[in-house]
Image (spheres, coloured by chain):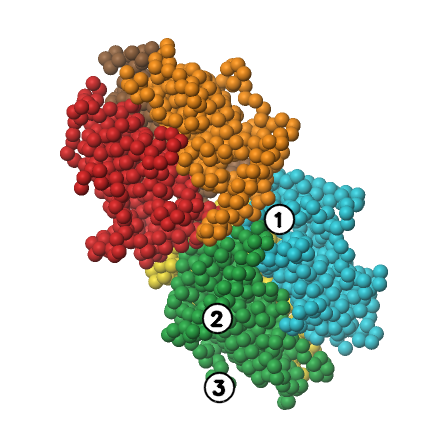
Chain colours: A red, B orange, C brown, D green, E cyan, F yellow
């Protein structure tokens, strides 16, 4: 696929889920139930929590909708209403479910601190914020914008993750730790991207229009990195922690520093082969950078 | 007004609201009600929320007090108590109400992602945190400090915005996204300032006294900027995202980088004409900076 | 003690509390009660809060367990369950209580904005997050990992402080403001350390094993600093706000910048005498750094 | 139908709802929505309540399930769980829905204090307790007895109405005021029955088996009446308020007093023509009784 | 005043509160505060409750509104909304406040189990239900009927006291224990009446119109008594516990039994001198009755 | 023991629990856990409830305290506070625990509708109200009267059971259905008593002092019976449902009617041999009574 196409986010819901998708969801859900059952037996103090959030439910969408409804509700936005909203979205749109499954796998594989699928489902606020945002995104596209914005606000209050409902997010995305992540209205995040906490994909002014970063597939963005403006971070690129990025970053190159420069130099940036969004390799050749 | 005066925050509540202030509040409130009514009609799932937070109330102070009371309450600080506290403050001090109205206008005008006044009132945690802080500030000045500090704590828990109740904040201030904002005890923020998320206006040690930044009118502070110590950021100045500022920044100049330097050089910094706090123009001449 | 030993976190609970520890706890608790009583008399609007959180309780562990249980509970993790869990931990392990007392003293002494012990106990989310993490750490070591991870998740949701339960934290630690702090699984934090908000002690990849920073006693880490990898920050060292640290920092030296360099140069870094974790002196010789 | 058949409660759910049932439900639901909309417009203070309980929902079963879930939930039985349970029952069993509609009509027609269908749906605890009991009854018959008994307990706590889940209740039943109603395990209540508050349909001992009253169609039972044992209250009979009934009561006769006797005498009891369960005529010929 | 006038409930709110009314309220409120302060000192476990419900408030209407708001709220009728509603009613209508004060005195004087004014204010559900009903009655008269009926429903759920908002209730009324009390739409209760639990003032059929009992001043109605129809219970009359009353009862006479007869006989009923509603003397000459 | 002694309620807590008491509690608790475990496996929708209320706890007192704390809490009386209060009472006073166990056995044996010990523990509001009253009684005797009265009020609100904390209640007591039970301050209830719903043990006036009924061991009181004044209901007596009792009832006799008379006549009342409080035999020879 030509790089230029990357930014045209592919629609997430074809007419029918593929067999593989269905199998995938079933597999992950069976794992989650098995994990929860084991933990409930070993830890009675947690059993009530595990039963109400996981084991009482007949499917992953129900469990997730219940959990999100209870996490995001407030005295003026009741849990039953949110539960209904989430369940309706996840039930009717298998693309949302496929993305959820891909995200669960991404967290499980990439984060050494993640001990199980259920650990991610229950405890990763980046994961939960992302699932809720996907539902908000769907509402946004259905022109139910006030509701989408109310969801954004609850996600920001509860998880300290502020992603505009219009932002497009691919599958297999890991928001690690997630506190303080801000993603603007016209941002696009590709598939298999890993984003650490305090990362900003922001605009540069009060002008409307297409004004936020486009993040290619397989990109890794380190903690505290700030990427501003309608710049393109190429597929498989790596953004160093704490970097301030105002420029395009070519595919499979690394940008670091404040302001960020390409490792190896602007003209002949060093290229890596692996996909850092998946390997989570934050390192780079220090010597290349220092100079 | 001489620059030196800037930092002496003018008292916000003259004896009577001016006619313009009263009209302004009435206009904004009528807009908010109209917006909410329209949205309630189009989106039944949100109608209950819109009625309880906006449409059931006879005035902006009541709506805001209700919303803040419900957002900031906890099992040990009841919503009714907080509602009473906020309502009493907003009712007796029209300066607070005028600041609220100015903030609503600021968000509406400056943030392209803000679609309506009610969007701001309901969903902007920076806006809500700021209104609650103003009430805490009033309590602080009335020597009701434990209560002011309890409010600060709730605001920090709920919104992840930590502004000391003694800090002085002007009118027409926009805290965009707001997560992670920290403002210290002796900080002063002027009018028409725009501050992005993760911004710190901090001290530099354990010494008490006047130890935090003074931010002039119309300043723009980019995401993740850290300004430490009793430094002065001159009127209309611009602080680049991710900057670490330990120096005074003259009016209408730009400071960027870690550590931050003035664009154009220390001796002859480049000056801009517009007021970045209002234009929200985060950009600067990259070339000037790189050098 | 040789520096290398520093990282072997000393066990926090000898068989019996020393007399000094018992006296210390009694003194601090009596101060807290006296403060709360005074404030309850002066501020009826806060009295209910002060009675329920402090004055109704017969001991510091009970008060703290109640407060944490109410702060961290959710609709699926009830306050009574958490209260029980915390109370059982604090009651049986005096080392936890001694650490709590040391932390209360640290905040009181080091933070000029802290007006009383009760102010810290009630309102400092860094303090509360740290006490809850210590209990999670104990559960982790008892192989009650799912419960420990559920606590971590609640702490991250409620306080926006994300500390892995396996991380080891010494006594007398101040997390100031605390929003956005992230501390990884194999990180170690010594005694008398002060850490500002938005600080990350992170890993550099998806490899498991010992991969997070080791922070020596008396270290000061400024706001927004990011320290990545299994590096050692020597005893009494100072890390400038906003720094990105990927290298070992020798004892009593200062590292600043992105990427961070030692003040005075790599080969002959400048050394300070005082212990910045306790003095909270964030300053350094600007001139040394600029060069 | 022979009287003996009365007590064999007919199964409530044939394979498909009849067209009339579907129309009936649609009509009543449209009335409820119209009433709620009118009231929401006239009374902003109630609008949030009306939207969340009625106007946000797409069907009567959803509205009722939401309302019951929120009324009957507790800190250990979450509203989302109950909502799911009720919605699943009402969705899959049209007989339950038909009974709900018949009850709504019964209340509306028979109680002069009932001003609208929505008044009944929202505010009549007898109506709500009865709908919840029907779901408990269904669970009981599916051998989900612990769940059925937990529901009974919540209904008794919340509404002070204690109906055993095994009890069989017909359609078009009015429980007026309802406080203190107790109905035992083997009781049967026919169609179009009206039962006032404090009515007991109880057993007479600790022996198990069929031991509670059987109430025929169209019976009216006055406030505070106590009917004990496996007695039969014939179709269209009337039980005076405060009566203590230990005997069979023939169809269309009246029993009053403590102990209750038949009006007109045991041998030739006076018969009425109308159906008191529907006319709600509590009166009787005083002179007949006094003698 | 002629007996016939009794039933014309006098309007409760003349233009201005008399000085005596104001003094009375001030006296009772000062007593309540003194009691609560004493108890808070002696019982730390209750202090939080006493502060939040009484000591944090500046007036009896505020305390009562807070308490009612918190008691009667639900997940769909928020405490802040109810607090507002109650406070607005009690603030603008001094007749409501005067009735509250008279009720507090009535309970304190007549019930030997009542140990203090605050005991009544906090714990007597009959008292609380009555105050809330008076507000519902006011709403009813303002044609805010759906709101009045919603209040009635909440009062019936929470207190098991079901009084129609249209019912007129005098001052100085004691509802002792109160569980199960039912009072119909057109019932009138005079001043200084005492009504025990399980008492019904009901109608006799489904006909609308004036159909409920009229209870004169100073009447005492024993536990479980049922009075049905538009009958008149004369001033100072006494109704025996468990009685079923379908007849007028002349002033200062006693009716007992099921069905109730006048003590001393229909033609020459025995008359008493004292006012049983105030003396709470439930006794009567057994011998008179037995015959 | 002479009959006269009956009314001197024996102190419930000797110095140490007997071995039998300890064994009894252990047996019943093991049954409860086994039942709950079985039900949790069969009914996932209830598992969370069963784990949080029973299976997460290490002892019956903890489970009961948790359940009562969650049932009786309100927004101003927090669950953690009540949990603490109950747990402290049940832990220090084994007599309370022995009474709890005896009550559980009584319900299990006497009520054919009771399917298991856990059914009673979780769902019987009469059982729960009684356990909470026993704790209130203990507080009353410790002169913590305001707290005892606050508990009484919560029990009355939540369970519609109003028992004065000063009332003395024996062991092995069954309150069946329980709604509307009222027991006055100086009432005494012996061991192995069974009391149905709507039963009043009331006073007859506003005079203080010893003014309520004394109920002997093994008495059965039918639904809706009202017993007024300082009368004695002898050991093993039976009170018919709906009776109004104003006289002493000799041991092992039956009183029925309004007003109640002794079956068999005042002078030579019929005596039964069994203990109706245990057999729950509500029947009596109708013919004896009719005459």
Left or right, E258 with reference to A252: right
State the residue position of label 2: D24
Query: Residue E115: horizontal and vertical position, in percent?
Result: 68, 49
Residue occupying the point 66% across, 83% down: D263
Residue B144 shows up from this direction = no
State the residue position of label 3: D1
Of labels 1 and 3, the one closer to you: 1
- Between marks 1 and 2, how big is the CA–CA gap? 37 Å
Query: Residue F196: horizontal and vertical position, in percent?
Result: 57, 67
Work out whether disc 1 and disc 2 sit on a shared chain.
Answer: no
For this orientation, the residue located farthest to the left is A273
Work out whether disc 2 and disc 3 sit on a shared chain.
Answer: yes
Query: Residue A123: horizontal and vertical position, in percent?
Result: 34, 44
Between discs 2 and 3, the one toward the N terminus: 3
Residue occupying the point 44% across, 17% down: B251
Query: Residue A256: horizontal and vertical position, in percent?
Result: 25, 26
- Residue C79 higher or lower than E258, as above or below: above
Count of all numbered marks drawn on residues in the image = 3
State the residue position of label 1: E85
C214 or B197, nearer to the observer? B197
Residue density around tag 1, few if under 14, some if 14–19, many if 20 or more, within 10 Å: some
Question: Label 2's element?
Answer: helix
Question: Label 3's element?
Answer: loop
F138 or F44, nearer to the observer? F44
> Which chain is disc 3 placed on?
D
């Amino acid at each position: 696929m030509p790089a230029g196409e990357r930014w045209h986010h592919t629609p997430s819901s074809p007419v029918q889920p593929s067999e593989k998708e269905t199998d995938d969801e079933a597999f992950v859900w069976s794992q989650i139930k098995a994990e929860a059952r084991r933990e409930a037996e070993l830890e009675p103090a947690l059993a009530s929590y595990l039963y109400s959030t996981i084991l009482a439910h007949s499917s992953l969408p129900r469990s997730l909708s219940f959990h999100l409804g209870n996490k995001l509700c407030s005295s003026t936005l009741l849990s039953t209403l949110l539960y209904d909203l989430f369940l309706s979205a996840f039930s009717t749109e298998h693309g949302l479910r496929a993305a959820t499954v891909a995200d669960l796998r991404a967290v499980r594989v990439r984060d050494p601190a993640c001990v199980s699928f259920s650990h991610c489902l229950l405890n990763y606020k980046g994961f939960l914020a992302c699932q809720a945002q996907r539902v908000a995104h769907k509402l946004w596209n259905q022109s139910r914008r006030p509701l989408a914005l109310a969801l954004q606000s609850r996600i920001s209050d509860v998880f300290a993750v502020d992603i505009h409902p219009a932002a497009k997010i691919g599958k297999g995305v890991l928001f690690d730790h997630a506190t303080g992540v801000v993603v603007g209205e016209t941002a696009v995040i590709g598939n298999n991207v890993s984003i650490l906490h305090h990362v900003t994909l922001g605009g540069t002014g009060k002008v409307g229009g297409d004004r936020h970063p486009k993040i290619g597939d397989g990109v890794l963005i380190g903690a505290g990195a700030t990427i501003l403006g309608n710049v393109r971070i190429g597929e498989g690129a790596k953004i160093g922690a704490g970097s301030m990025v105002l420029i395009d970053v070519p595919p499979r190159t690394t940008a670091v520093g404040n302001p960020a420069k390409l490792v190896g130099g602007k003209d002949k940036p060093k290229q890596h082969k692996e996909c850092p969004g998946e390997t989570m390799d934050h390192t780079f050749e220090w010597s290349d950078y220092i100079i």
